[in-house]
Amino acid sequence: MNTDLKNAWENLKKEMPKLRIRDAAKHLNVSEAELLATKLGPSVKLLKPDWADFLLNTTELGYVMALTRNESCVHERKGIYKDISVNGQTALAVGEDIDLRIFLNDWKYGFYAEEPKENDVMRSFQFFDSKGEAVHKIYQTDKSSTAGWEKIKTLFVDETQVFTTPTKTSKPKTETNDSKEIPQFLEAWSKLEDTHDFFSLLRKFKYSREFSLQAASGKFTFKISTEDFLNLMQESSKRELDIMIFVGNPGMIQIHTGKIQRLEPMGPWFNVLDPEFNLHLRTDKIESVWVVDKPTRDGLVTSVEVFDNEGELILQMFGKRKPGIPQSSIWFQLTREYLNPSLV
């Protein structure tokens, strides 16, 4: 255990008692996983890195809160882990409530944690990547299966409890963003048959996502303002439209499907505060917002994609749809209400 770091964190908490662990890690120039590891002992335990087996057992946890975030957005969804499948280093959870796309190559550390909360204890399983950044967290609720939590804790706690310091290196970027190939790229875009094929298209041309949207501006994409995007959220709520909100990081994408109801701006944060779904978006981190059309065999599929100032995808928003079913005409028309006049 890093005693110096533990002491530094304790001192910081005295100065700033409401500071969250992620923000404390930034203050101390370490990762969140490193801070959590300073608590290894009775209340915090390392987990065996058997991620696939762990996921296959999550159905026994019962009703929980699943949390996935990136630097600018937090996505919290309550429900039960269902229909878990693992294929090599990718996995899926496709329940009606908890809907996940999981990339296990980016999972490095797992913890079981118990933290004091008023007159109770908040229990969680927390997972981090090789840099110690949070990938996914699962929190117990008062509707969870106590027996299931105890069973999984017993099965997956690593008795050796040896924590290795995260690496600070980042994966090298493979994008070239060669503008000479834009005509060929747009031609290939026009022949898409499934939204998932877009990832392969980006890899083939070695384009970053944001560069590709800029390249397609006026043909398949157009830019809207942050204010337009927030208005789009408000209108979706007012019209009680079923939408899909994707938030992710390299190791996880978490999806909410359904209506959004209680929307509350609080300073730089734009929040959805519904009983089963919470979203916390830092609007001051938004650099650009794009409306994106992709042709598919089911017709056009339209998304709204939000990026930060480093070109990282913060959030995606779609009208609710399933393969074989066209997207909502109401959703499509709603996105067109913010069409750039220069494209009309």
Image: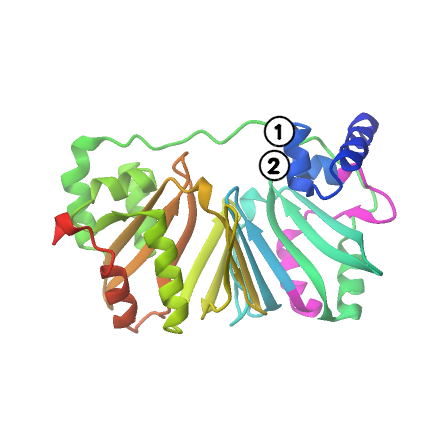
Q: Are marks 2 and 1 in contact (CB under 8 Å)?
A: yes
**In the image: residue 271, left or right of residue 156:** left
Instruction: Kindly identify the residue that appears in the image at 83 percent across and 46 percent down.
Output: 159
Query: What is the magenta range?
Result: 37-64
Location of the N terminus (image quadrant): top right
Answer yes or no: is residue 193 visible: no
Residue bearing the label numbered 1? 167
- Could you tell me the amino acid type at mark 1? Thr
Mark 1: which secondary structure?
A: loop
Near-viewer residue (81 or 283): 283
Near-viewer residue (246 or 107): 246
Position above or below: 332 against 127: below
Q: Position of residue 206 (x, y in %)?
A: 30, 36
Instruction: Kindly identify the residue that appears in the image at 55 percent across and 49 percent down.
Output: 69
Mark 2: which secondary structure?
A: loop
Residue bearing the label numbered 2? 130
Q: Position of residue 25 (x, y in %)?
A: 67, 34
| Alpha carbon distance from label 2 to label 1 | 6 Å
- Could you tell me the amino acid type at mark 2? Ser
**In the image: residue 17, left or right of residue 251:** right
Answer yes or no: is residue 49 visible: yes
Q: Residues within 10 Å of mark 1 (few under 14, many from 20)?
A: few
Q: Residues within 10 Å of mark 2 (few under 14, many from 20)?
A: some
Instruction: Kindly identify the residue that appears in the image at 30 percent across and 43 percent down.
Output: 202
Location of the C terminus (image quadrant): bottom left
**In the image: residue 201, left or right of residue 173:** left
